Amino acid sequence: QVQLVESGGGLVQAGGSLRLSCEASENIFRIDAMGWYRQAPGKQRELVAAITARGLTNYADSVKGRFTLSRDDAKNTLYLQMNSLKPEDTALYYCNAQLRWKDYWGQGTQVSVSS
């Protein structure tokens, strides 16, 4: 079992920045992959960004150049730095961990971007 606790969401104006944090109950270097997904009202959950245990990253085209993943292995925490936020980034953001072919999810943190 991997427990994930997200934080860092909030309300920000367009062009602003937020940093999301996801603290895992496991040593994250043991986790196969971690990432952030988001779900806007009436839409399907979509991948925002992900990183493998080896450090390979993958970003959605819509966030490339604006969002950056990083992790602190000592704190078992994954971060998502979000810059130049747009109203279309408004969504509930979920942290995901994949371990031994199982998916684990956090409770979600709301990001709202006003125009």
Image (cartoon, rainbow, N blue to C red):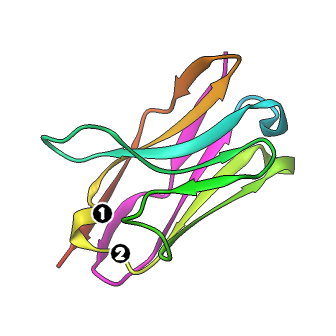
Q: Is residue 5 magenta?
A: yes
Eyeballing the image, is 65 above or below 79?
below
Q: Is residue 92 above or below residue 59?
A: above
Residue 113 screen position, x and y as percent: 26, 69
Measuring from the top left, give residue 9's x and y in whole percent: 42, 57
**Quarter of the image where one finds residue 57:** bottom right
Residue at figure coordinates x 54%, y 35% from the top left: 96
Disc marking residue 23: none
> Which quarter of the rendered picture does the N terminus lie within?
top right
The residue type indicated by label 2 comes to Leu
Quarter residue 101 falls in: top right
Q: Is residue 76 left or right of residue 83?
A: right
* Snapshot quadrant of residue 76: top right
Other-residue count near label 1 (Cα within 10 Å), few / some / many at <14 / 14–19 / ≥20: many
Give the labeled residue for mark 1: 89
Query: Judging from the image, what secondary structure is the residue with disc 1 in?
Result: helix
Total numbered labels placed on residues in the image: 2
Q: Which residues are magenta?
A: 1-23
Work out which quarter of the rendered image holds the C terminus and state it.
bottom left
Q: Are marks 2 and 1 in contact (CB under 8 Å)?
A: yes
- Give 30 or 23, whichever is nearer the viewer: 30
Distance in Å between CA atoms under marks 2 and 1? 7 Å
Tell me the crowding category of disc 2: few under 14, some 14 to 19, or many 20 or more residues within 10 angstroms, Cα based.
many
Q: Main secondary structure of the magenta part?
A: strand
Q: Is residue 86 magenta?
A: no
Q: Residue furthest right?
A: 74
115 up-or-down from 88: above or below = below
Q: Amino acid at mark 1?
A: Asp
Circle on res. 85: 2
Q: What residue is drawn where x is 22% and y is 47%?
A: 40
Q: Position of residue 93 (x, y in %)?
A: 39, 47
